[in-house]
Amino acid sequence: MSQASASSHGNKPAKSESRGFFARIVQFFREVFVELKKVQRPTRSELWKLFLTVVFFVAVVMAFVAAIDLVFAQLVLLIFS
Protein backbone atom coordinates (compact mmCIF):
# COMPACT_ATOMS: atom_id res chain seq x y z
CA MET A 1 0.00 0.00 0.00
CA SER A 2 1.51 3.32 -1.01
CA GLN A 3 1.86 6.31 1.29
CA ALA A 4 -0.68 8.37 -0.70
CA SER A 5 -3.43 5.77 -0.48
CA ALA A 6 -2.73 5.12 3.20
CA SER A 7 -3.15 8.79 4.08
CA SER A 8 -6.40 9.12 2.11
CA HIS A 9 -7.94 6.24 4.11
CA GLY A 10 -6.77 7.45 7.51
CA ASN A 11 -8.86 7.66 10.65
CA LYS A 12 -9.48 11.38 10.24
CA PRO A 13 -13.25 11.99 10.23
CA ALA A 14 -14.82 13.52 7.15
CA LYS A 15 -16.02 17.10 7.29
CA SER A 16 -19.69 16.08 7.47
CA GLU A 17 -18.97 13.69 10.35
CA SER A 18 -17.30 16.40 12.42
CA ARG A 19 -20.50 18.49 12.40
CA GLY A 20 -23.31 17.91 14.84
CA PHE A 21 -26.48 16.04 14.02
CA PHE A 22 -28.67 19.14 13.71
CA ALA A 23 -26.03 21.04 11.72
CA ARG A 24 -26.06 18.22 9.15
CA ILE A 25 -29.87 18.37 8.96
CA VAL A 26 -29.78 22.13 8.42
CA GLN A 27 -27.11 21.70 5.74
CA PHE A 28 -29.25 19.05 4.02
CA PHE A 29 -32.25 21.39 3.82
CA ARG A 30 -30.09 24.26 2.57
CA GLU A 31 -28.84 22.04 -0.24
CA VAL A 32 -32.40 20.93 -1.02
CA PHE A 33 -33.53 24.54 -1.38
CA VAL A 34 -30.55 25.36 -3.60
CA GLU A 35 -31.45 22.44 -5.88
CA LEU A 36 -35.14 23.43 -5.94
CA LYS A 37 -34.17 26.88 -7.20
CA LYS A 38 -32.56 25.18 -10.22
CA VAL A 39 -35.78 23.36 -11.17
CA GLN A 40 -37.44 24.58 -14.35
CA ARG A 41 -41.19 24.37 -13.88
CA PRO A 42 -43.47 23.79 -16.88
CA THR A 43 -45.74 26.53 -18.16
CA ARG A 44 -49.51 26.21 -17.89
CA SER A 45 -49.86 25.09 -21.51
CA GLU A 46 -47.01 22.56 -21.20
CA LEU A 47 -48.59 21.18 -18.04
CA TRP A 48 -51.96 20.83 -19.79
CA LYS A 49 -50.37 18.99 -22.73
CA LEU A 50 -48.53 16.64 -20.37
CA PHE A 51 -51.74 15.99 -18.43
CA LEU A 52 -53.67 15.15 -21.59
CA THR A 53 -50.87 12.86 -22.77
CA VAL A 54 -50.96 10.92 -19.51
CA VAL A 55 -54.76 10.65 -19.52
CA PHE A 56 -54.75 9.43 -23.14
CA PHE A 57 -52.01 6.86 -22.44
CA VAL A 58 -53.84 5.55 -19.36
CA ALA A 59 -57.10 5.27 -21.35
CA VAL A 60 -55.35 3.30 -24.11
CA VAL A 61 -53.75 0.92 -21.62
CA MET A 62 -57.11 0.46 -19.84
CA ALA A 63 -58.82 -0.39 -23.13
CA PHE A 64 -56.08 -2.87 -24.00
CA VAL A 65 -56.27 -4.59 -20.62
CA ALA A 66 -60.08 -4.68 -20.80
CA ALA A 67 -59.94 -6.29 -24.25
CA ILE A 68 -57.47 -8.94 -23.08
CA ASP A 69 -59.64 -9.57 -20.00
CA LEU A 70 -62.73 -10.11 -22.16
CA VAL A 71 -60.88 -12.49 -24.47
CA PHE A 72 -59.55 -14.57 -21.59
CA ALA A 73 -62.94 -14.57 -19.84
CA GLN A 74 -64.57 -15.95 -23.00
CA LEU A 75 -61.84 -18.59 -23.33
CA VAL A 76 -62.35 -19.68 -19.73
CA LEU A 77 -66.11 -19.95 -20.30
CA LEU A 78 -65.57 -22.01 -23.46
CA ILE A 79 -63.09 -24.35 -21.80
CA PHE A 80 -64.79 -24.92 -18.45
CA SER A 81 -68.49 -24.74 -19.29
Image: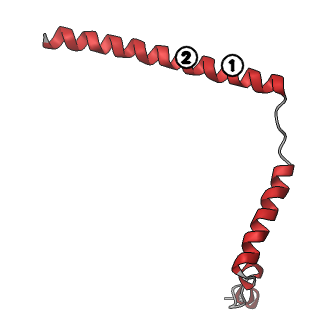
* Residue 59 placement (x, y as % from top left): 55, 17
The scheme the figure's colours follow is secondary structure
Mark 2: amino acid: Ala
Residue 67 left/right relative to 36: left
Mark 2, residue position: 59
- How packed mark 2 is, by other alpha carbons closer than 10 Å (few <14, some 14-19, many 20 or more), is few
Residue 81 left/right relative to 73: left
Mark 1, residue position: 52
Earlier along the polypeptide chain: callout 1 or callout 2? 1
- Quarter of the view holding residue 34: bottom right
* Residue 39 placement (x, y as % from top left): 83, 45
- Quarter of the view holding residue 48: top right
Mark 1: amino acid: Leu
Q: Helix or strand or loop: what does disc 2 sit on?
A: helix
Examine the rendered structure and indicate whether residue 74 appears above or below residue 40. above
Residue lying furthest left: 81
Examine the rendered structure and indicate whether residue 41 appears above or below residue 36. above
* Residue shown at the point (28%, 14%) measured from the top left: 73
Real-space CA distance between mark 1 and mark 2, rounded to the nearest whole angstrom: 10 Å
- Marker disc for residue 39: none
Residue 68 left/right relative to 55: left
- How packed mark 1 is, by other alpha carbons closer than 10 Å (few <14, some 14-19, many 20 or more), is few
* Residue shown at the point (72%, 70%) measured from the top left: 25
Q: Helix or strand or loop: what does disc 1 sit on?
A: helix
Quarter of the picture holding the N terminus: bottom right
